[in-house]
Amino acid sequence: MKIRNIAAGLLTMTTLLSLSASAQTTDKPAKKKKHRTGSVYFSWGYNSEWYTRSTVHVTQREQQNDYDFVQVNAHDHKGWNEKSIFKQPITIPQYNYRLGYYFNDKQDLAFEINFDHTKYIIADNQYIRVRGIRNNTPIDQDILFSQQNGFYYFLNNGANFLLFNIVKRYGLYHTADRSIAIDLTGKAGIGPVIPHVENKLFGAMNDMGFQLGGWNTGLETALRVTVMKYGFLEFSQKVDYARYSHLKVAANGTAKQHFGTYELILSAGFILPTSKHNPLFEKTPVVAHPAQ
C-alpha cells in the first residue's frame, strides 16, 4: 500500500513539473529574426601633397656603389591645375578613390579600400650631399641634382598609396528627412605602396615601371556633406608614412627611402543601402511629447 501511494505521488509530481516547463516555454517571447544592415559607398577626387625631406640610399653591387643622397627636397605634380580636368584623361592628375562598406547596425563603422595616386619628384636644380662609397671609393660631396647634369628621380606615374582602412563615422547634423546630412569621419589603415619608378643617377637610367615597393600607413579625417541621401561631397586631410625599398635603379641596383606626406583631398561620391531599414536612409521618428 505504501509503495502504491509513493508511486502515485511521484507520478503527480512528474506531471506538475512537465506542465510547469510547458507553460514557461509557451510564455517565452518568439525570437526576433536578425537582419543585416549595410551600405556601400564610392568616391573619386583629386589631391595635393607636401613631403618631408628624405634620404635616398642607393646600392649597386656590380659597380661597388653604396651611397646616400642626403635629405633631398621633393614636391608633387598636381596635374589638375595645369589644364581643365575635362580636357585630359581623369587618371592623369593626382587622383584618389575610396570604396567602402558600412557593416554595423548603427552604420557608423566601415571597412574601406583607400587609394591615392600621388606623385613624388625630387626637385630639379638643388644641391644634394652625396655620401658613402662610389666606384669602391669614398665620396662625400655636394652635387647639382638636375636633369641637365645627368640626374632625375621620379615617382611621377605614382608614389601610389594603397590602404585598407577602418572607418568611424560621427554624425554632426541631419534634417528630419535626411535630405541633408553632415558627418565627420576618422580613418586609419595600412597597406602596400605601388610606385612607378623612373630615375637617372650619374647619367645612368633605370628600366622604369611599376613595382611593389614597400608599405605605408595613414590617418585621415574627412568632413562629408550628403545631399538627397545618396550623393555626397567630401573634404579630407591625411597624413601618411611610407617606406620604399628595392626600387629599381641602373646596373641592377636598388634604392630605398622613407618619408612623410600631408595631403588635402576633395572628392565626390555616392552611397547606397544594401538592406532595408537602414538608419542612414530612414526619416528620424517624431517623438510625441505628452501635454503639460
Image (cartoon, rainbow, N blue to C red):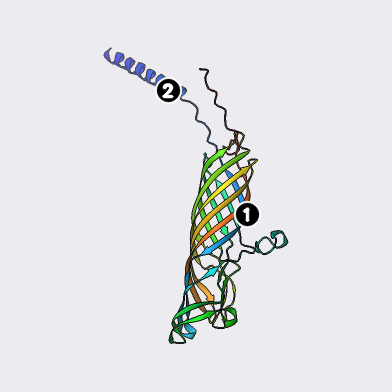
Above or below, 283 against 28 in this view is: below
Q: Dot 1: within a 10 Å radius of its alpha carbon, few (fewer than 14), some, or many (20 or more) residues?
A: some
Q: Which label lies toward us, 1 or 2?
A: 1
Residue 218 position in % (x across, y down): 49, 57
* Residue 247 as seen in the image, left or right of residue 11: right
Residue that protrudes farthest toward the right in the picture: 87
Above or below, 174 against 239 in this view is: above
Residue at x 48% of width, y 25% of height: 29
Residue 97 position in % (x across, y down): 60, 56
Q: Label 2: state its secondary structure.
A: helix
Residue 101 position in % (x across, y down): 56, 47
Q: Dot 2: within a 10 Å radius of its alpha carbon, few (fewer than 14), some, or many (20 or more) residues?
A: few
* Near-viewer residue (220 or 63): 220
Which residue is labeled 2 in the image?
24
Residue that protrudes farthest toward the front in the picture: 126
Which amino acid lies under the numbered mark 2 shown in the image of this protein?
Gln
Q: CA distance from mark 1 to mark 2?
A: 57 Å
Q: Is residue 36 visible?
A: no
* Near-viewer residue (224 or 32): 224
* Residue 125 as seen in the image, left or right of residue 93: left
- Residue 276, numbered label: none
Which amino acid lies under the numbered mark 1 shown in the image of this protein?
Trp
Residue 105 position in % (x across, y down): 52, 39
Decide which of tag 1 and tag 2 comes sooner along the chain: 2
Which residue is labeled 1 in the image?
44
Q: Label 1: state its secondary structure.
A: strand
Residue at x 44% of width, y 24% of height: 25
* Near-viewer residue (35 or 205): 205
Q: Is residue 34 visible?
A: yes
